[in-house]
């Protein structure tokens, strides 16, 4: 079971970093991308997270959770930099 936990934790960390890198690149290269756009995507991710009626596996849950965490982190950091 420990091996499975390690894979899930590793996947979470990798997905968080990949998503964060993607968000940084998007903001740097797409002048039309705003924090409001990212917040809209985050809101949709929350809906996806809640729509788990078919049941997703632990690995897919970790990927979605990492994506949500990256968006939350990036949005918060961006707002703090502007303040």
Image (cartoon, rainbow, N blue to C red):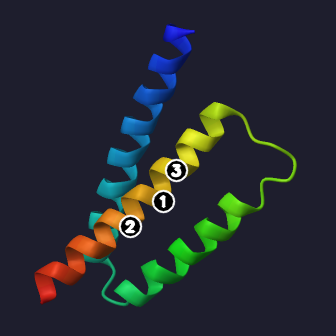
Q: Which residue is drawn at the image coordinates 40% and 54% (left, top)? A: 19
Q: Is residue 33 visible?
A: no
| Disc 3 packing (10 Å; few <14; some 14–19; many ≥20) | some
What quarter of the picture does the N terminus occupy? top right
In the rendered image, residue 44, in percent from the top left (x then y), is placed at 62, 73
* Residue topped by disc 1: 68
- Looking at the image, residue 82 sits to the left or right of residue 66; the answer is left
Count residues near mark 2 (Cα–Cα under 10 Å), then give few for <14, some for 14-19, many for 20+. Answer: some
Residue 65 shown left or right of residue 72 in the figure: right
- Pointers 1 and 2 in contact (C-beta within 8 Å): yes
- In the image, what residue occupies the spot 48% across and 59% down? 68
Q: Say above or below: 9 vs 63.
A: above
Q: Which mark is residue 72?
A: 2
Q: Is residue 70 placed above or below 45 in the rendered structure?
A: above
Q: In the shown orientation, is residue 65 left or right of residue 83?
A: right
- Percent of width and height locating residue 2: 50, 10
User: Sequence-wise, which precedes: disc 3 or disc 2?
Assistant: 3
Q: CA distance from mark 3 to mark 2?
A: 10 Å
CA separation, marks 1 and 3?
5 Å
**Quarter of the rendering occupied by the C terminus:** bottom left
Q: Which mark is residue 58?
A: none
Q: Name the residue at 42% across, 89% down.
A: 36
Q: Residue at x 77, y 61 (%)?
A: 51
Q: Which mark is residue 65?
A: 3
Q: What distance separates the C-alpha of mark 1 from that of mark 2?
A: 6 Å
């Amino acid at each position: 079971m420990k091996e499975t936990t390690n894979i899930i934790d590793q996947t979470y960390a990798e997905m968080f970093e990949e998503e964060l890198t993607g968000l940084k690149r998007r903001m740097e290269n797409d002048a039309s991308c705003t924090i409001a756009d990212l917040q809209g995507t985050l809101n949709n991710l929350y809906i996806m997270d809640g729509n788990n009626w078919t049941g997703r596996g632990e690995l897919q849950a970790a990927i979605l959770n990492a994506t949500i965490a990256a968006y939350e982190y990036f949005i918060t950091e961006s707002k703090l930099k502007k303040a």
